[in-house]
Image (cartoon, helix red, strand yellow):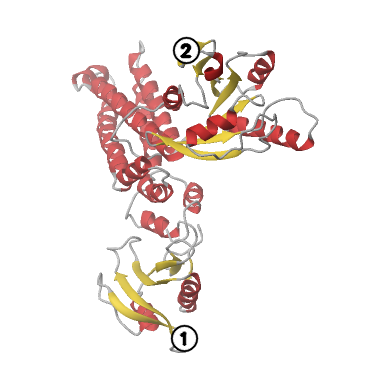
Amino acid sequence: MSGVKPADTIAAIATAPGRGGVGVIRVSGSKLLPFAFALTGKIPKPRYATLAEFKAADGSTVDSGILLFFPNPQSFTGEDVLELQGHGGPVVMQMLLSRCLDLGARLAEPGEFSRRAFLNGKMDLAQAEAVADLIDAATSSAARSAVRSLQGEFSRAIGQLNDELINLRMLVEATLDFPEEDIDFLKAANAFGRLETLRLKLAEIFDRAGQGKLLQSGLHVVLAGQPNVGKSSLLNRLTGDDLAIVTPIAGTTRDALRSTIQIEGIPLHIIDTAGLRETEDEVEKIGIARSWQEIERADAVLLLVDARTGVTAADKEILSRLPERLKRVTIYNKIDLSGAQAERHDEPDTTAISLSARSGDGIDLLRQELLRIAGWHQAEDVFIARERHLRALSDAQEHIAAARNVVESTFPALELFAEELRLTQQSLGQITGEFTADDLLGVIFSRFCIGK
């Protein structure tokens, strides 16, 4: 979209595909009153609902509904915006969209409305991303956090931090002109205390954003283990539904089964895989290969073993093949048959939960362990965040730490101190879009819905 002229008029269906009581088409561009008149024969009053008939080129009626006009700059995109609210059938929506294209609009690209809002200063980049995150929210907690980000809470927190950083930078830059008094001057102005305050506030924002990242993407958990250890039973127990077929026949599960549950608002994407074993069955071999592919992509793996036999040589072989980065929990299942008690305990390089997928005894222990693995702690003021936000915040923390090391050295070099502060500000600016390359904008907005 880098070659697109801002003056282009764009149009798209803004409601979800399929049948509905109402369908909405959004149009954005410059000087849209002639466009509205050509479409309806009316000049709409700004921000008032106008009953209108949407006309084809030959004057016949395509549909009837509500016409809304939002003149620039008081609109979502900062340009003139028309919203056509008609009947929500897919055919009539396509006919109405085609009429808009005949009148000179072009089909909007994914995220182009939000991108124009960003480029026209109606929202910053973090707020624009929150639009898509609100639409994609898988839990009510994620939706509430996305609303907070959309309303600017995340951006204001970054802005306040940035303001304090700018004041500190101004102080440091001023001392560079007086090298014989620089350290004493900075101490008198409490510059190093300000740096420590910045470090603590940045850590707090990183924590809140990290919790928001969990709400946005959740945790991908794979159930792995030998055949007949109860993986499918555990999936059914966690989801509260009979999603997986459970039989005493080894190799019943041939392909990965996926389901998403939520624990305290955190989406947990649970994947049941084929039993890991040596087999001559060609179909089962494919399922086992896919199991290992799922394990490679997972955030955590639950290795199920039979509580009556414990960890066998075959289980140890599976453990040895797991990626080192992968968080893992050993699940001793079938305690209803072994006579053991439900419990959590530590083992070398892992934790273990003893439970019964059949009876549900110990399932709450597993849920709490999954939250612990995810790094979740209860908080009401988190804002939705993405991986790129966390990377930017992490970079900012590294530069603050480097600045701190400079001032704590025997012979502080204030030029280096000033440079680390500048790099900190640059990292924070990537979050709101103050310092963002055009190619990154293209990647971000291309993942939005058409019509947003």
Residue at the farthest right position: 280
Check disc 2 and report its element: helix, strand or loop: strand
- Give the side of residue 336 with respect to residue 277, left or right: left
Check disc 1 and report its element: helix, strand or loop: loop
Q: Residue 57 carries which label?
A: 1
**Identity of the residue drawn at 33% across and 41% down:** 145
Residue 223 image point, x, y percent: 58, 29
Q: Which mark is residue 348?
A: none
Residue 38 image point, x, y percent: 39, 83
Residue 33 image point, x, y percent: 33, 77
Which of these two is toward me, 168 or 90?
A: 90
Residue 271 image point, x, y percent: 57, 35
**Mark 1: few/some/many CA within 10 Å (<14, 14-19, 20+):** few
The kind of residue on which mark 1 rests is Ala
The kind of residue on which mark 2 rests is His
Q: Name the residue under label 2.
A: 345
Visible residue check, residue 69: yes
Q: In which quarter of the image is the C terminus?
A: bottom left
